Image: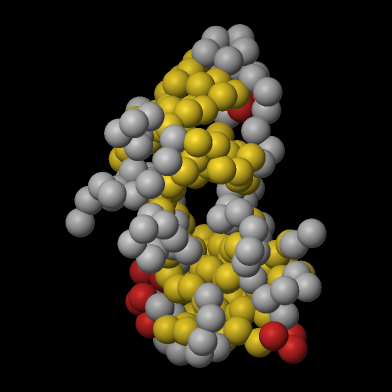
Amino acid sequence: AQSVTQLGSHVSVSEGALVLLRCNYSSSVPPYLFWYVQYPNQGLQLLLKYTTGATLVKGINGFEAEFKKSETSFHLTKPSAHMSDAAEYFCAVRLTGGGNKLTFGTGTQLKVEL
Amino acid sequence: AAGVIQSPRHLIKEKRETATLKCYPIPRHDTVYWYQQGPGQDPQFLISFYEKMQSDKGSIPDRFSAQQFSDYHSELNMSSLELGDSALYFCASSSRSSGTYNEQFFGPGTRLTVL
């Protein structure tokens, strides 16, 4: 069975500071990995994804994530937080070779303070 | 660019009533997925369809059914509604033929409240 663990249900950073949101997966086969962002009362927007190839993935809004197979991690980072980054972030996995359904982590609420 | 359309955006029902949620995928997308997000929870996969056939099934209650029509839109039918069905229901779509199969595009969701 595959699962996704997001460490920290709430993360608070100062504007301009580094953003680090953690995601670990458990799967015997490297899955496809995704980060989604959800603003209040809105749908899920894809930030970035890893399927194959380069392990450092760049997404929208200055976010990037690195797939580390040895650590079974896919942490999301952004060098400098902006107030508009305040939202909930979900890490998700799709097991390769199986169905295309996504399994989501429990989410991390990012708060950006002045 | 056209996005996934869901209707209605908000729905209020009484216990034991029925509800129908509709999803219109992005044009030329052939696969539709339904997810349920309870208050303060992560989205949970319910069911998916490819070319009008059920392709995968998750934690969908027996009281719920869904189908995909010839124009690729999908409907989620929910009967004997319970208070616990109150949630945000997302539809997502993807396309096997265009190479974007691994990327699911989500709609804005339908917020169902059961009183």
In the picture, residue B99 is in which quadrant? bottom left
In this rendered view, identify the residue nearer to me: A24 or B99: B99
Q: Nearer the viewer, residue A19 or A50?
A: A50
Image quarter where the C terminus of chain A lies is bottom left
Asked whether residue A10 is in view, the answer is no
Residue beneath the point at 51% across and 22% down: B77
Q: Could you tell me how many numbered marks the image carries?
A: 0
Front one among B44 and B56: B56
Q: Looking at the image, is B59 positioned above or below residue A22?
A: above
For the N terminus of chain A, give its image quadrant.
bottom right
Residue A81 lies, in percent from the top left, at 43, 80
Which quarter of the picture shows residue B97?
bottom left
Q: Is residue A2 left or right of residue A79?
A: right
State the colouring used for the structure image. secondary structure
Most extreme residue toward the left is B1
Q: Residue at x 58, y 29 (%)?
A: B86
Q: Residue at x 42, y 41 (%)?
A: B51
**What is the x, y in percent for residue B80?**
62, 13
Q: Does A29 sit above or below residue B43?
A: below
Residue lying at 74% horizontally and 62% vertically, measured from the top left: A3
Is residue A106 something one can see in this rendering?
yes
Residue A86 percent across, percent down from the top left: 45, 66
Q: Quadrant of residue B103?
A: bottom left
Q: Position of residue B56 (x, y in %)?
A: 60, 43
Q: Is residue A68 above or below residue A11?
A: below
